Image (spheres, rainbow, N blue to C red):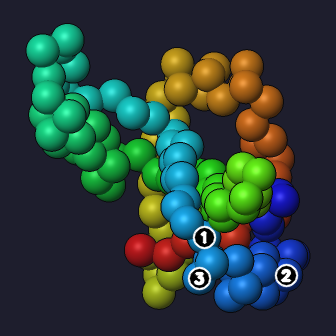
Amino acid sequence: MQVVEKNFEEFYGQMKVYLPEADFISLDLEMTGIKTFRPEVLSDTPQDRYTKMSSACSNKYKIIQVGLCLFTKKDWGFVARPYNIYVFPRESYGYSPQIILDSSTCDFHRTHHLDWNKCLTKALPTYQ
């Protein structure tokens, strides 16, 4: 399901039903950039990588899409309920957040068919 401001109520209704029965969930964030000042190396532990990558999630880059998938186990396998939630920062209380776009990240999103128009015009608003 593509989730935008217009169908948020439908998404919310489904979350109230399906989230409590999910056996596990997956989450993926798409951002306007992911560059960090500390490069990753092969010897990084998962904690090292998390620490380095989380620095990109500071105020420098913004989340523009949240991928959420709920998995429910059945006798024959799993039911997967995927949601693609478009979000975009909006002005609030006189504060207008800067949006920094990394060109290589924008190219990645373009080649993977991220709908920028949907991000800019139909996304759920986020406020800081």
Q: Residue 89 at what x, y percent from top left?
A: 56, 64
Q: Residues within 10 Å of mark 3 (few under 14, many from 20)?
A: few
Q: Amino acid at mark 2?
A: Glu
Q: Nearer the viewer, residue 88 or 76?
A: 76
Classify the position of the N terminus by image quarter.
Answer: bottom right
Q: Quadrant of residue 34?
A: top left
N-terminal label among 2 and 1: 2
Secondary structure found at label 1: loop
65 relative position to 8: left or right: left
* In the depicted structure, whether residue 55 falls above or below residue 106: below
Q: Amino acid at mark 3?
A: Pro
2 vs 1, front mark: 1
Measure the C-alpha gap from mark 2 to mark 1: 18 Å
Q: Residue 75 at what x, y percent from top left?
A: 73, 58
- Residue in the picture at 63% in, 78% down: 21
79 relative position to 61: left or right: right
- Residue in the picture at 79% in, 30% down: 113
Mark number displayed over residue 22 = 1
- Residue in the picture at 78% in, 64% down: 3
Mark number displayed over residue 31 = none
What residue is pinned by disc 2? 10
